[in-house]
Image (cartoon, rainbow, N blue to C red):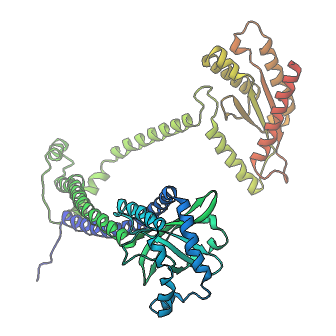
Amino acid sequence: MKKKVRFSLYAKATILISVAALILVEVAMFYFSMVTSSTNQNRYKDIGNNLSATVSAVIDAEQFKELKGEVSAIVDATETIPSIDDRESEEWNTYIAQFEPIQSKPCFLEMREKLRKIADANKQDADCVYLAYIDAARELFVYCVDSAPDEDACPPGWIDPIFDVNREILTNPERGFPAYITDTEEYGALVTAGVPVRYNGEIVGYSFVDIPLATVKATQAGQIIRLFIYLVVTTLVLAAIVIYIVHLTFVRPLRKLNAAASSYDATNPEGTHEIFKNLDVHTRDEMAVLSASMVQMEQDVYNKIEELTRMNEELRASQQETERMTELANKDGLTGVRNKASYEQEVALIEQEIEAGKMEPFALAMIDLNDLKVINDEHGHRHGDTAIITLANVTCGVFVHSPVFRVGGDEFVAILRGNDFRYRKELVAEFRKKIDQLSRDEELSFAERISAAIGYADFEEGKDQKVIDVFTRADEAMYEAKRSMKRRAN
């Protein structure tokens, strides 16, 4: 019988992690290639916008206006401009020949020299810099001066169509030519940007910058190669670390546990303890052997019911600790009443009752301490805390059967139900009476002679959809009470 090949758990983990690492590299390369492409395009669009704006700022606008005037005079005088598609025709050559005298004029030569200097200074990014204007009537793009070498430059009068992406320029010259990408047979793939050039507030024409996408792609290729090397190295290192961690934290302990389980002896706990201290066993397939060993250990676990009892007691203690921590999490640390998080939980329960149509009558009482800022500013935050604690004690003392929440620095909410709801008017009056007594009690400290306003509102079935509806009315009632107190004080 042919022996089946068996892989250890360590080998399986290594293979799985290696495959996952390769997939991760592939996915990361695809994702980052897309991100890099978009980022580089946006970067070079920004370069185009900024460089064309720089050209617009440094170019002599008066010279440009003079040059444009000479070019446009010839263009306007040409009754029929040859088709852009016929640039190899005799008619086209005749049309372009009209502009040759312009190319020897000082204004043209000076502007071309300045553009070439700008282009040379930015040759790492920009392909060429040029000036042109828009013939809105004929919907044409007319060149005036180009920084490219003579054999590649578009001479004065050279025309191009206006692409759909830029047709808004015909009705909105101020828009300019925010960076856009084109790919034509004549010029290739380019990032182009254009900014208005103004003379005495008037748009003379536009300064343009062309950036070949080959530059963008070259930059992107370099970034992708560096990214690939980084990803491969990082993935290999991480995979090795993960494999080693899996070995230390999973494979080796499982082997040791399996050996210990196989030799476990319930009648000799001391000897078993020593075995667990010196675990050192190697297996071909740890999980398979461990599974068989657990069957033997099950009988021992059954006979160790007292261990389960101890664990149950620990679980009970843990649950009690969890309940205690939950209580602390819902309690305000300064006053001991419930906090805002507890209030929001209570609101959620009430709104469930409202939606289920099982809502019992309730009201919200809003309480707000007066002049807390004055107390803090003039006497210190310690006295402010005393005032807040005093208000919390009074509120809890009046609304004994209602949950009280601190929802702000000096704001409290009581949810009135049952008897507190039935006697809400009396309780509110009692609260106001106690506050009035406190404010007049000369035996109390300054911080304990507090003043506070209270307002309440009832839940109105059919009208209120959410607790916030009741809260808003109670808050308004409280602020009206506060204003009334101020009027009486004045």
Q: Residue at x 85, y 32 (%)?
A: 480
Residue 359 position in % (x across, y down): 78, 50
Q: Quadrant of residue 103?
A: bottom left
The quadrant of the rendering that contains the C terminus is top right
Report the label total: 0
In the displayed orientation, state which residue is furthest to the bottom. 90
The quadrant of the rendering that contains the N terminus is bottom left
362 up-or-down from 205: above or below:
above
Residue 133 position in % (x across, y down): 56, 71
Q: Is residue 419 visible?
A: no
In the displayed orientation, state which residue is furthest to the right. 488
Q: Between 320 and 50, which is closer to the camera in this rendering? A: 50
Residue 163 position in % (x across, y down): 55, 78
In the displayed orientation, state which residue is furthest to the top. 443
433 up-or-down from 307: above or below:
above
Q: Quadrant of residue 62?
A: bottom right
Residue 91 position in % (x across, y down): 51, 92
Q: Residue at x 53, y 64 (%)?
A: 64
Q: Is residue 278 left or right of residue 387?
A: left
130 up-or-down from 457: above or below:
below
Q: Residue at x 60, y 31 (%)?
A: 332
Q: Between 149 and 124, which is closer to the camera in this rendering? A: 149
Q: Between 269 and 159, which is closer to the camera in this rendering? A: 159
Q: Is residue 102 visible?
A: yes
